């Protein structure tokens, strides 16, 4: 009985695998997509870590304040690479799909661990990329906190990636170069010695007796698809060689040329999809792509003061406190405590800087700010320019109500307590009566509606 | 370098990669249990399992069906036309998978009008319609060409 099940199930899965055979689904394609995906994952991981530590620095960490657009670049890259992963991941999964139908599904403890690590990798990647994408829409339809999960999961993903590369390394080395992967006619060179499960010609499906369950059904489907029994066929879109020889074939007639065309067509599809999603959404992060911004969740220039808003005054609960005429900015230094009204601040004379707002969600925009230099303000309470500060907002709640600022930002001459934005008073949505703007920091740390600045070190 | 030396280096690299991978995963798991409450971790686990099911039971069969249909269409359509159709289908599917959640988000996100500001339904409809036109045109032109060729071959026969 067991044998019969083995033969039957193995046969059906084998036939299904056979029907998935395609010149796109070989080890070389897996290596090509794997390389691109690996690169994108590493870019996302590195830029993600940078963003994480900007927000939660270890005590000894200091960050560059120049170029001021550094975070704009790294986070734009994070989101763009993340979006590019979507079509690449689909392409990779499609390429290795025959492995999904491997029979027997598990051959030993090592194989079980390998398949388990791939399951973790694939599900982790799908969840990470999807939740990351939807986070840029500011929508959180899942039962876990986004930031902590995205961070922890990124280690699981990168670890799984290292294991996956380790497991497949012989295949990766064998098919790293195109010239080792295809013969002079451009046909894939199968090599059964490196352990690939994707050998369309080498791993011939063992011939099964016609009476086995499933065989006839699958055979009928295959005849419907290809018009003839295609066991000897290359499995590319197009008729089988027998059929081709017997009738007028669509061009090209040569099977090797068909294989090349099918392969290039697939790469062209994935390449176009990657380019498509980047071009149609990248305009929120990169100026060059702005005219093609069709699907991004943000539009540069849209919003009060011609700038998009992330956290609104209403969401922060400051609609009343921010416009209170008695508002004053409290400065606390070494034993000195002073309060400044908006008129006091303005009377100090405003300096103008151009700095971008760069959001963790990927959108960014350059803006012109006018305000008082932070290092001049802390000098008024007797603190040196390289002071560490704690800035508190009028916000009632929220993870970024209190922000700490390292000395590298306090002493930078472009770090301001800003009162004006793009030629007008700050809109309440952008932090009226006063907000912080500093170079190279995520938007969540450019605290709005500030009420106090305290020197803490 | 000899192939034995390469084999040796590959073997060492594999061991290092797998060990590093296990350590990094352990770090991720540790971070997870120290920063997330247990019920949140279970929430994440259900999402991870759902992702595998989504991929294995829905996405993969869908791709197989599309591939089979393209292959069957390939019997009577010019190969280049088929490639053009394939490109348009892949682009359409990828845009659909990224913009559909955005459309849904628009119904849930009411924070401020600068988040998801566009009419994504209309924009997606236009782009997808253009792609559908490309697919149909490629298939029609591709199969017509073939008919002409058959006719031409018949004449020369």
Image (cartoon, coloured by chain):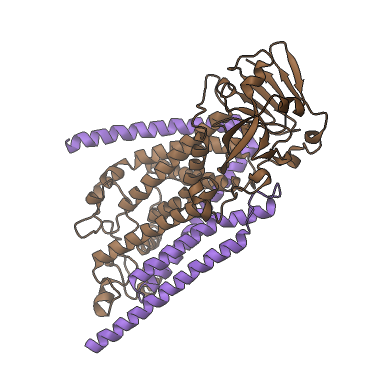
Chain colours: A brown, B purple
Residue A287: x and y, percent?
A: 51, 47
**In this orientation, does residue A112 appear?**
no
Q: In the current view of this chain or complex, which residue is farthest to the top? A: A335
Which residue is pictured at 24% across the width and 59% down the height?
A: A187
- Viewed as shown, does residue B127 lie left or right of A214? right
- Which residue is at the front of the view, B20 or A448? A448
- Viewed as shown, does residue A306 lie left or right of B7? right
- Which residue is at the front of the view, A200 or A433? A433
Q: Relative to A17, say whether A218 is above or below.
A: below
Residue A298: x and y, percent?
A: 60, 49
- Viewed as shown, does residue A176 lie left or right of A102? left
Q: In the current view of this chain or complex, which residue is farthest to the left? A: B2
Residue A349: x and y, percent?
A: 68, 26
Residue A32: x and y, percent?
A: 34, 49
Which residue is pictured at 31% across the width and 33% down the height?
A: B13
- Which residue is at the front of the view, A379 or A113? A379
Q: Quadrant of the C terminus of chain A?
A: top right
Which residue is pictured at 55% across the width and 19% down the height?
A: A59
> Where, by quadrant of the figure, is residue A116 drawn?
top left
- Viewed as shown, does residue A428 lie left or right of A200? right
Q: Quadrant of the N terminus of chain A?
A: bottom left
């Amino acid at each position: 009985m067991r044998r019969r099940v083995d033969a039957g199930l193995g046969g059906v899965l084998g036939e299904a695998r056979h029907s998935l055979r395609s010149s796109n689904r070989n080890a070389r394609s897996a290596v090509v997509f794997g390389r691109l995906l690996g690169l994108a994952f590493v870019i996302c991981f590195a830029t993600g870590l940078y963003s994480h530590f900007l927000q939660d620095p270890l005590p000894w960490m200091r960050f560059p304040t120049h170029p001021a657009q550094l975070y704009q670049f790294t986070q734009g890259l994070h989101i763009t690479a993340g979006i590019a992963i979507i079509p690449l991941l689909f392409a990779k999964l499609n390429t290795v799909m025959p492995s999904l139908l491997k029979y027997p599904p598990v051959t030993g403890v090592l194989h079980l661990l390998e398949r388990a690590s791939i399951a973790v990798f694939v599900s982790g990647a799908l969840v990470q990329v999807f939740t990351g994408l939807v986070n840029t829409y500011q929508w959180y339809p899942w039962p876990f906190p986004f930031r902590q999960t995205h961070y922890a999961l990124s280690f699981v993903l990168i670890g799984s990636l290292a294991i996956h590369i380790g497991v497949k390394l012989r295949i990766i080395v064998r098919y790293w170069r195109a010239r080792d992967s295809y013969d002079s006619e451009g046909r894939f060179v199968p090599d059964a010695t490196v352990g690939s499960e994707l050998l369309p010609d080498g791993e011939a499906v063992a011939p099964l007796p016609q009476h086995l369950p499933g065989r006839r059904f699958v055979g009928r489907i295959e005849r419907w698809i290809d018009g003839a029994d295609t066991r000897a066929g290359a499995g590319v879109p197009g008729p089988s060689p027998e059929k081709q020889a017997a009738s007028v074939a669509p061009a090209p007639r040569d099977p090797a040329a068909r294989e090349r065309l099918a392969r290039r067509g697939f790469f062209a599809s994935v390449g176009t999809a990657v380019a498509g999603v980047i071009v149609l959404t990248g305009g929120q992060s990169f100026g060059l792509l702005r005219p093609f911004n069709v699907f991004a969740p943000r539009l540069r220039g849209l919003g009060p003061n011609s700038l998009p808003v992330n956290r609104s005054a209403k969401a922060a609960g400051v609609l009343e406190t921010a416009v209170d005429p008695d508002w004053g900015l409290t400065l606390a230094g070494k034993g000195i405590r002073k309060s400044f009204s908006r008129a006091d601040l303005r009377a100090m004379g405003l300096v103008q800087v151009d700095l971008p707002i760069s959001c963790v969600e990927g959108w960014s925009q350059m803006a012109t700010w006018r305000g008082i230099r932070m290092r001049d303000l802390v000098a008024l309470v007797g603190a040196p320019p390289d002071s560490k500060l704690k800035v508190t907002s009028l916000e009632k709640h929220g993870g970024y109500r209190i922000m700490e600022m390292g000395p590298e930002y306090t002493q930078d001459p472009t770090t301001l307590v800003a009162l004006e934005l793009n030629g007008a008073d700050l809109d309440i949505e952008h932090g009226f009566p006063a907000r912080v703007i500093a170079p190279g920091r995520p938007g969540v740390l450019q605290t709005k509606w500030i009420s106090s600045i305290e020197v803490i070190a | 370098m000899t192939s034995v030396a390469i084999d040796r280096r590959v073997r060492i690299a594999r061991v290092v990669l797998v060990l590093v991978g296990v350590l990094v995963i352990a770090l991720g798991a540790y971070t997870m249990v120290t920063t997330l409450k247990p019920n949140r971790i279970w929430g994440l686990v259900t999402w991870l399992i759902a992702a595998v099911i989504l991929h294995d039971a829905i996405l993969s069969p869908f791709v197989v069906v599309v591939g089979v249909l393209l292959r069957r269409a390939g019997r009577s359509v010019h190969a280049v036309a088929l490639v053009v159709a394939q490109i348009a289908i892949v682009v359409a599917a990828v845009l659909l998978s990224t913009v559909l959640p955005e459309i849904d988000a628009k119904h849930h996100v009411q924070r401020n009008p600068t988040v998801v500001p566009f009419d994504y339904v209309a924009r997606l409809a236009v782009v997808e319609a253009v792609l559908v036109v490309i697919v149909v045109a490629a298939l029609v032109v591709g199969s017509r060409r073939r008919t002409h060729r058959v006719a031409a071959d018949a004449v020369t026969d």
